[in-house]
Amino acid sequence: MLRFIPIPAQAGISGFESPAAEYTQSTLNLDELLIDHPSATYLGYAEGESMVGEGIFSGDLLVISRFEKVKDQDVVVANLNGVFVCKKIDKRRALLLSAAPGRAPYHIREGDDFQIEGVVIRSIRLHRPLVKSI
Amino acid sequence: MYALCDANSMYASCEKIFDPSIRDKPVVVLTNNDGCICAACHVAKRLGIDKKFVPYFKVKEDLERAGAVIRSSNYELYADISQRMMDVCSRYAPNSHIYSIDEVFHYYQGWMPPEGWFEHARAIRRAVWQEVRLPIGVGVGPTLTLAKAANHAAKRIPGYRGVAVIDDEESRRYILQHMELTDVWGIGSRLARRLTALGVDTVWKLANANPGWIRKNFSVLVESTVYELSGTAKLGWDDVRAPKKEIYSTRSFGQRIYTPEDLLQALTQHAGIAAAKLRRQNSLAGAAIIFATSSPHDNQGYYRKHITHRFAVPTEDTTVIAAACRSALGQIYREQVPFYRCGVGLVDLSDKATSQHDLFNCSVDNSELMACMDAINVKYGRDTAHIAGQGIRQKFAMRREFLSPQYTTRLSDIPRVKC
């Protein structure tokens, strides 16, 4: 379990007490919905507009998995010369592709410090900013 | 077979996970309150700046010259990374036993990995690197002591590159012949000197020594080590896990403390921390050692004072231990002393389950209240509920000048990714 939120977020139908309440199996838990491999999953904030074509806007929350095998054209987080970047990876041509009009691809050259850090498996739009509780 | 998975320079490696800009740099981590160096990454070790437990101020300039990155201990981060490492490692074995924040033992009973022990160990190492970005060493052997020896080989003997397996006579001989006596689990430097004096001056000789003779001259423990080194398992989890015999909570202050109120608050906080640890291992404390000192580096005379407070009935109750601190304060506190450090040690521990009741002295412990407080603090974080005596705003909070963000445990500290 990711332990950054002290209380698991839960979504359920409420309003009147259901006669079937005793048969409820379990409430939904966002961790379970969004995270497949908790010990290999990390969160990051997106900063910048170069991935809007993939639906990732500045300020979105990225769910990054280090468990997944990286496939061609995956949206990944990589270390490029000491900075975490979020791009699409073109494995065959060694390119980092943006997903916004007018952005040139970045060609990974020898001498670049480059490692893929994980695959972006979900992104979450924070329509209102996160409120730090407690 | 057993395996030991052990992180390389755990704290320094943790600092590199979420800060790619320092991955190739020498990184050193300082102890609580930025006092001493407690961990150095391999780059720093290669540069010779891994002065473990040397006070930071003494090597500050050397570190600067070497371009070292300094970090304060970020236990919130290390604890989270540790748990991830343990999760990944324990996928690979039917039984595992967490030995410390950066070490976990596996026990495979009769099971054999179809891909062979070496490939199996490599797979663990690769998975932890891929999923957690933590470099670890893995050692495999037929006893706990040999697994520990293989782990030593994995990290220290050239050619092994992070993985070593002792599964036949040849590998056992090679690894043991390349170790020093003090590299063996349970052999300290004093024991090594005594062994050498009696002619047992190599690990290989120790492994082939007569166990009875060793027991006569040393102890049952060293005898077990001999058996274990020759491949006969003598130690189990319980031998390596014995509950702590004493529990200390102690820390130096971020700034000097001069008033009795502040000192009492600090002591009370330590009473709370130590008592919570005590309850976690289901023990009772027979006595508390309550102490405070000035800094040995201050130029006015060094002051230290400790009080041992014996409880009428062994206790686990924070309020009882805090009351002992209050009654000791008068003897510990002295005006004009710049207090630098204080702490509470709980000693003479006994098992709560087998405690004897006393006809004349009744325990005043409020176990239900303590259980409730512990439950709140587990759920909502340490110090959510505490006794009022430790104060609400603390002047003596730790100094952590070079603290990295708590990348995985705090919403505001989640890493930023450039898009």
Image: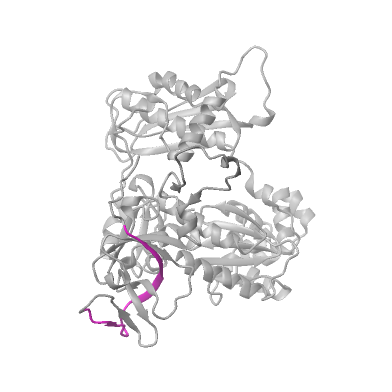
Query: Which of these two is toward me, B59 or B369?
Result: B369
Q: Is residue B43 above or below residue B35?
A: below
Give x and y (percent) for residue B6. 54, 61
Q: Is residue B266 left or right of residue B216?
A: left
Q: Residue furthest bottom?
A: A93
Asked if one can make out residue B201 in the rendered structure from this viewpoint, the answer is no
Part of the protein shown in magenta? A103-125
Residue found at x 51% / y 59%: B85
Give x and y (percent) for residue A69. 48, 74
Q: Residue furthest left?
A: A102
Tell whether position A111 is magenta.
yes
Residue found at x 61% / y 15%: B362
Query: Which of these two is toward me, B180 or A55?
Result: A55
Name the quadrant containing residue B250.
top left
Name the quadrant containing residue B71.
bottom left
Name the quadrant containing residue A91.
bottom left
Give x and y (percent) for residue B106. 64, 60
Asked if one can make out residue B249 in the rendered structure from this viewpoint, the answer is yes
Query: Which of these two is toward me, A35 or B155?
Result: A35
Q: Is residue B316 above or below residue A39?
A: above
Q: Is residue B224 left or right of residue B317?
A: right
Q: Is residue B110 left or right of residue B274?
A: right
